[in-house]
Amino acid sequence: MTATEGTNREERESRSDSRQNPSSQIDKVMLDARLTEDLLNRLLRSNDIGAFLDEGHVADIELTDYLHNLLEQQGLTRADVARASGLNPTVVYDLFSGKSRPGRDNAIILSIGLNCDLQETQRLLRLAGVSELWCKQRRDAIIIWCVNKGYDRVAIDHELIRFNEKPLMSKRV
């Protein structure tokens, strides 16, 4: 890890006291997956969809609500997110206002700018309507590893280029 990567990680960790250690994050993701699977099984066994929905198991949250929640939770401004992500500030504003929806790479970049952990990143991708990161795909595995280590976008792009994968933002070197 370079000095820049270490500094970026320290900055990201200092912004959020609620950050968990990597093994706890993995445990949290696994628990969430099990709970979702249990919920799916309950839905499939249900005789009445209305009763299932009335039980309050389904959350109807919009991407913009989630983005604003993350922004508040991390104590960031949209300008902070634009700076940290490298996205154009107008793009960031449009995403937060709901005027546009991000593509997959921009959603990943946005999650990095918001200092999201892996679970928050996956949820942001789901709410954006794009596919989640999948560890069986080489490029995604690199991104997952980097997010889990707290790398910023530049460091993640560096790792992607190092393994001859398409970077999130810049052109292939």
Image (spheres, rainbow, N blue to C red):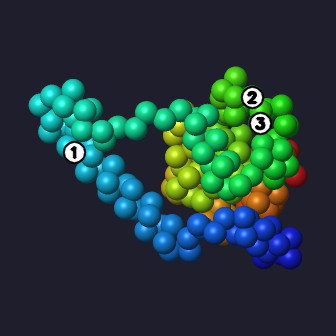
Left or right, residue 47 beside residue 22: left
Assess whether mark 2 and mark 3 are in contact (beta carbons under 8 angstroms).
yes
Does the image show residue 105? no
Q: For numbered disc 3, what is the local secondary structure?
A: helix
Q: Residue at x 66, y 27 (%)?
A: 98
Residue 40, quarter of the rendered image? top left
> Dot 3 corresponds to which residue?
92
Q: Residue at x 45, y 60 (%)?
A: 29
Nearest-to-viewer mark from 1 and 3: 3
Query: Marks 3 and 2, Cα distance to the nearest angstrom?
Result: 5 Å
Vertical arrangement, residue 159 with respect to residue 137, above or below: below
Disc 3 residue type (three-letter): Val
Q: Earlier in the sequence, mark 2 or mark 1?
A: 1
Query: Marks 2 and 1, Cα distance to the nearest angstrom?
Result: 37 Å
Question: Which dot marks residue 169?
Answer: none
Q: Residues within 10 Å of mark 2 (few under 14, many from 20)?
A: some
Q: Residue furthest left?
A: 47
Assess whether mark 1 and mark 2 are in contact (beta carbons under 8 angstroms).
no
Query: 106 or 114, which lies in front?
Result: 114
Query: 164 or 80, which lies in front?
Result: 80
> Dot 1 corresponds to which residue?
41
Vertical arrangement, residue 83 with respect to residue 90, above or below: below
Residue 27, quarter of the rendered image? bottom left
Quadrant where the N terminus is found in the figure: bottom right
Q: Residues within 10 Å of mark 1 (few under 14, many from 20)?
A: few
Does the image show residue 1? yes
